Every structure is written in C-alpha cells, then in structure tokens.
Amino acid sequence: MHKIIIVGGGLAGSLTAVYLAQRGHEVHVVEKRGDPLLVDSANADPVNSRAIGVSMTVRGIKAVLAAGISRQELEQCGEPVIGMAFSVGGQHKVRELTPLEGMFPLSLDRTAFQRLLNKYAVIHKVQYHFEHKCLDVDLEGKSVLIQGPDGALQHLQGDLIIGADGAHSAVRRAMQSGMRRFEFKQTFFRHGYKTLVLPNASELGFRKDLLYFFGMDSKGLFAGRAATIPNGSISFAICLPYSGETSLNTKNREAMAEFFSRYFGILPAASRQELLEQFFTLPSNDLINVRSSTFHYKGNVLLIGDAAHATAPFLGQGMNMALEDVYVLITLLEQHGDAFGLALSEFTHQRKVQADAMQDMAIANYEALSNPNLIFFLQTRYTRYMHKKFPRVYPPDMAEKLYFTSVPYDELQQIQKKQNVWYKLGRVN
Ligand SMILES: Cc1cc2nc3c(=O)[nH]c(=O)nc-3n(C[C@H](O)[C@H](O)[C@H](O)COP(=O)(O)OP(=O)(O)OC[C@H]3O[C@@H](n4cnc5c(N)ncnc54)[C@H](O)[C@@H]3O)c2cc1C
C-alpha cells in the first residue's frame, strides 16, 4: 500500500482516486474548490462551471465503468446521443451515427457526474482536502505545499504525486521550473467562450439525443455547441473572438441581439432575449492548448488529463482522454507494481503520442468549424457513401469511430489523413 497525493479533485483526479483507493492505497486529494456533495458548495454552482454539458464518448464510458461505477448511475447523469445537428441558414442538418460497440455516447450533466465520482470516492475512503490550494511541489521530496481557507500552509508528503489540476496546473508549473529540459508550449485560440443555459430544451424543439453545432455559416465568426442534460435544460457553449462589435468583450447590445436573431433564429424571441441577458452578465473563458514534452518526473510525479494536455473542446475529447489516461495509468501501475519509475515513463511514452494526435485533430476541427463551407457536409456524405461501397479500401467515417469506439487517437488521425487524400483524389477525378 502506498500513500498517493492527487492534486485536483476534478473529473480525472476523482476517478484516479476511486481506482487507487479501491486497490488499497491511502489516497489524498487536494482540491481548491468546495465539496461538490454539499449543496451550497462553490463547486456545485453550475454557473461557475466551465461546461455544464459535456459529451462522454465510448472511451470515457469504458474508463468509468472499469472503476466499478454503476452503468445505471452513470446513465442517470446524462442522455444517450445518436447524432449531431449542424445549424445552417437557421435549419438543422442532422447527421445520425451508428453505434459500433453497442454503446451510445452520453450528453452529461457535468456537475451530476462530478458528484457521482465523489460519492464513489467517499465510499472507498478517499481523503479530500477541499478548499485547499496546491502552491508548490517538491519533485524530489514528493511533497506538496498546500494552503487552506484560513491561509494556513502545510506540507503533504507521499510516495507518488499525481497532478490532475487542469489546464493551469500548479504541478506542471513545478515541473517546468524544477526539471531539466522540460519543454512546454501554451497557445490560446482566437476564440474564447461563454456557457449559456436555457431551461425547457424540448419545448424549444431540441432533441435530447443530438449534439447541436452552430456557426457553420458564420464564415469563422463563431462556433457554438449545445447539448441537453437530464434536468431538461440545454447548455450552449458560444465561442467568439475577443474584439469587435460581435465579440466576447462587446458592449454593443444591438450587435449581439442581431447575432442571436441571425444564428439562433429557431428560438422564440423570449429565449433569444434570455441568451442575450446571460451573455452580458456571465464571464468569458479562454480556450487554451497546452503541450508538455513529458508527463512525468522520475517515479515521483505525474501529470494527467488537462494538466498534461488541455485543448479546446472542438473535438469533445478533453474529458474523455483524461478519463482514459486514468485507466491507462492504473493498468501500468498494476503491471509494474512498486516500480513507479517504469510505470510513469511508460505512461508518457504511450500517452504523449495520443495527446498530440488528439490535440492536432481538435485544432483541425476548430479550423473546419470556424472556416466551414459546404464542402464540409459533402465530404462527410462522400466518405460514408464510399466506405459503404468499398469497405476494404475506403476508410470509415472518423466521427463514428471517435464517438463509438476507443480506437487510439493516432489511428483515428491516420484515418482522417487517408480520408483527406482519398477525398482530394475523388475531387480531382
Ligand atoms: C466549453 C467546454 C466544453 C467541453 N466539452 C467537452 C466534451 O463535450 N467532452 C469532453 O471530453 N471534454 C470536454 N471539455 C474538456 C473537459 O472539460 C476537460 O478536458 C476536463 O474537464 C479535464 O478534466 P481534468 O480533471 O483533467 O481537469 P479539470 O476538470 O480542469 O479539473 C481540475 C481540478 O483541479 C482543481 N485545481 C486546479 N488547480 C488547483 C490547485 N492549484 N490546487 C488544488 N486544486 C486545483 C480544479 O478546481 C479542478 O477541480 C470541454 C471543455 C470546455 C471548456
């Protein structure tokens, strides 16, 4: 049995805690926010959460179920999704997808899922240090310096430190300053986002089983995604640039009213007005891409999830990859026993290539969504037609594989590249 300290009790951190505590380790989680199981906790406040609805694809579902979390309870946190709807000219073009492993992705209520993980962590006696912030990590000494709500400082020392503290990770910062040859690159997307919510999704005509995409006809001005969650509401992530009349920082209500009328014309005027009010009240958030040259320091410290490889949500894979990271880590720890050094270096070896592929695909999707044209839709149709007709030579629809399987990201990227080559050849011919 080892003492393991996890920094960050979000989705990746809490799932890791469940797995490790189940295996008999003494697990401590340092989380700067409050306890999500307490109703009045800051963590339970959906307005402050970054994305109220997140889609969990088959790879995420598998990682969660393998931790012994009940499928029924997981499904209660979300709605099964069977396809995507792209809004063009005020109409939705629906693209249904076919499940490949008998599992549907879920459109999840993020808060409900976080609570489910915390419930299981409590069952397995994980020790949470809520409202404690990690300030620094001693990489050699395997200890973290944390600060409680009263400002008091303390050191927590363990056999292994896991940094699951998200895109602005304090653990990664310590690695940056304390490791030789640690390379790090942080880039911001041209767009940031606000999350807006409307109650009564079905009354507004939204299907529970579709993910909605907006902005395909905005010539790159904006991209938006919306998903319904089990409480009946629909949450919109509206991604816009930071400057201009129609932007996250605009003060021009008329321009934004025109924006909502133009791109959300399917909504009744009262709902558009509500979106407008929320838009001018709620804060905006950045979209960031983070790449690190390694995810570990000796057998002492490891980064997982967004702390290792945050990216923009245009592929909907950040959480899914984070959850899969956890599954891979646990498998490696079981394979290598006490040899943490071997397990962690193998983790970097296996996951770095997957993270790079996932981020490249997310960025490519961002480009496609923020600079789309009709060819996007034709290409998708063409791909599916050709794969049906020539299944041996023509690669399958990448989106179906992404949503309905846990095929490694680097293989999916190869499929995407092949499709592009075939598609270009098809166009030339
Ligand atoms: C708008 C939007 C939509 C998204 N949609 C999807 C989607 O549909 N599907 C998908 O797979 N992914 C999606 N993502 C990505 C997904 O949200 C992240 O990839 C996922 O949350 C990563 O989980 P994590 O546990 O690694 O990090 P986080 O969820 O960021 O958790 C980190 C935790 O660490 C805590 N913490 C941070 N710093 C410290 C510190 N110094 N001390 C103590 N605690 C600390 C934080 O409070 C937090 O609880 C979306 C992201 C955005 C922004």
Image: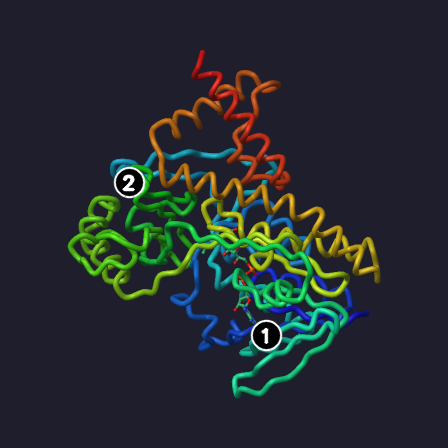
* Residue that appears at 25% across and 36% down: 89
Q: On screen, 165 above or below 108?
A: below
Residue at the farthest left position: 254
Q: In this view, does 359 lie above or below 36?
A: above
Q: Mark 2 points at which residue?
A: 218
The Cα–Cα distance between marks 1 and 2, rounded to whole angstroms, is: 42 Å
Residue occupied by mark 1: 134
Percent position of residue 72, x then y? 58, 55
Frontmost residue, 323 versus 306: 306
The percent coordinates of residue 373 (x first, y second) are 34, 31
* CB within 8 Å, label 1 to label 2: no
Query: What amino acid is at disc 2?
Result: Ser
Residue visible at 28% across and 59% down in the picture: 249
Regarding mark 1 in the picture, which secondary structure is present there? strand
Q: Which residue sits at x=51%, y=57%? A: 76
* Mark 1 C-beta to ligand 1 under 8 Å: yes
